[in-house]
Image (spheres, rainbow, N blue to C red):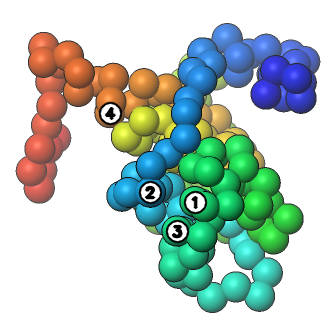
Amino acid sequence: MERAGLLSGTRGEQIAGRFSMIRTGPFGRGQQWQSLIAALEDGLRLHRHDDGTLVQLAPYLHSRSGGMIGSLLRLVGDAGLFRSPAELRSRFAGLGLPTSPEQAGDADGQPVIGAYCGSGVTAAHEVLALELAGLPAALYVGSWSQWSSDPARPIATGADPG
């Protein structure tokens, strides 16, 4: 990211100011990898593609990428594009999220949508999809792994965790 200049310019500096880089190693071939592949497939528009194909190819994709997210995205990148901004907005509206940038930010323009997952990787993909949809979002980089490591933090469970 640093070499590619993705966090340069005014907007890039604003985004970089909200996040910190966490270097990661390869993913194992377990459930976390399967979930990552499923989330990736859900967010991409793949040409001549049947739903579920990437998930079925998860072992092959792991062997080709060595479990590295960057290598995986490179493998799949030429075949896939994110869904259109309108499709993404519709998908997020179906999940109960705001439908316009004005609704997605507070009075100071800070995002009111936050994304997290198990380790932050899949949520980063969601934040990018939200940004493409015109909905500013923040990434909780530590995600569940960091939150749950402190027994003093609240954890809600059940059908109505409200």
Q: Which mark is residue 59?
A: 3
Amino acid on which the number 2 mark rests in the picture: Arg
Which percent across, then down, holds residue 39? 52, 60
Residue at image coords 63%, 88%:
50
Q: Residue at x 51, y 73 (%)?
A: 55
Secondary structure under badge 3? Answer: helix
Label 4 amino acid?
Trp
Mark 1 vs mark 3, CA separation in Å? 5 Å
Which residue carries the number 4 mark? 144
Instruction: Tell me what residue is drawn at x 77 percent, y 88 percent.
Output: 48
Q: Give yes or no for contact between labels 3 and 2 (Cβ–Cβ under 8 Å).
A: yes
Inter-mark Cα distance, 3 to 2: 7 Å
Element marked by disc 4: helix
Q: Position of residue 57 (x, y in %)?
A: 57, 75
Q: Which mark is residue 62?
A: 1
Q: Which residue is mark 2?
A: 29
- Picture layout, residue 153 above or below residue 112: above
